Image: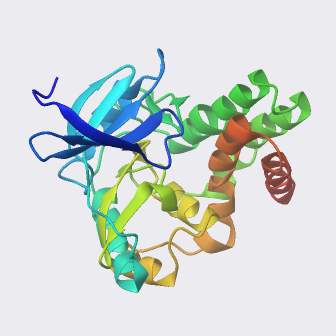
Amino acid sequence: MLGCRVVAERRLSGGCVGDVRLVELDDGRRVVAKLGSRGSRLEVEGTMLTDLRGSLPVPEVLFSDDDLLLMDHVEHDGVQGESGECHAGTLLASLHNHASDRYGYASDTLIGGLNQPNSWDENWHAFFGEHRLVCMARQAKQAGRLGDATVTRVERLVSGSLKELLGEPQPPGLIHGDVWGGNVLAHQGQIAAFIDPAIYYADPEIELAFITLFGTFGDAFFESYGSMRAIRPGFFESRRDLYNLYPLLVHVRLFGGGYVQSVERTLSRFGA
């Protein structure tokens, strides 16, 4: 496939969708191989990485199909620090400046192996409500991890007060879509690469919200980001929790457990 022979390999951590390995080739190159089962749709991840390349540091895709993704190995030591957070703020602010005239994407994408429908829509409230919140709540219900009553509460929020609670959205900006610590590779105090994207054009606040959910970055990130793109009043106070309903629903669909209670608490906070 790459015209080389494998001389060594070892398993790497991560890989929600597939088994991830570091492979050494006889020409001296090191590549990362993600191996999935039939239906893994790893070619979608390959397309997303290729689409991001040039706009964000990501691994170069060498080959992709349904059950195999080959990428260049990116050197990283995990050393991020405040300088890495500042670098991440600059990189993501620049990415979010990539504009579109509509929300969505040219094709559906994936988050944690789950389908993200991306039909183009000029209305952010409708896109976020239907293609993210309601869609993922129904996926979680079908998987047996979310009850009918909670799905109804999500639907009630979307058809009721969601638009008022979110206010006027920002214009569509390209987002990575899944920025948590495991998807950020740092090296010597700088960001070496972002991996496992879930891209689409969104109100970029949804990306910032997810960054706060698991503490991916802290104050240095937001100061750096804010110096390039203003963060509107009310984001930290309310909108970030509303936006984080989506990743919480993703985690309910994937893992269930305590994430259900987190969803229900958020719904209660916003009167649903």
Instruction: Pinpoint residue 8: horizontal percent, then vertical percent.
Output: 28, 41
Of the 4 image quadrants, the one containing the N terminus is top left
User: Is residue 25 or residue 269 the one in the foreground?
Assistant: 25
Number of numbered labels in the structure image: 0
Asked whether, in this view, residue 189 is left or right of residue 253, the answer is: left
Q: Is residue 213 above or below residue 27?
A: below
Q: Residue furthest front?
A: 7
Q: Is residue 169 visible?
A: no
Residue 229 placement, left or right of 165: left
Residue 194 screen position, x and y as percent: 35, 55
Q: Position of residue 41 (x, y in %)?
A: 42, 23
Between 205 and 110, the one nearer to me in the picture? 110
Residue at horizontal 83 percent and vertical 60 percent from the top: 269
* Above or below: residue 76 compared with residue 194: below
Going 48% across and 20% down the picture, which residue do you hit?
37
Above or below, 175 relative to 20: below
Please report the residue visible at 35 percent of the width from the left and 25 percent of the height from the top. Answer: 68
**Rendered image quadrant of residue 153:** top right
Q: Position of residue 91 (x, y in %)?
A: 30, 66
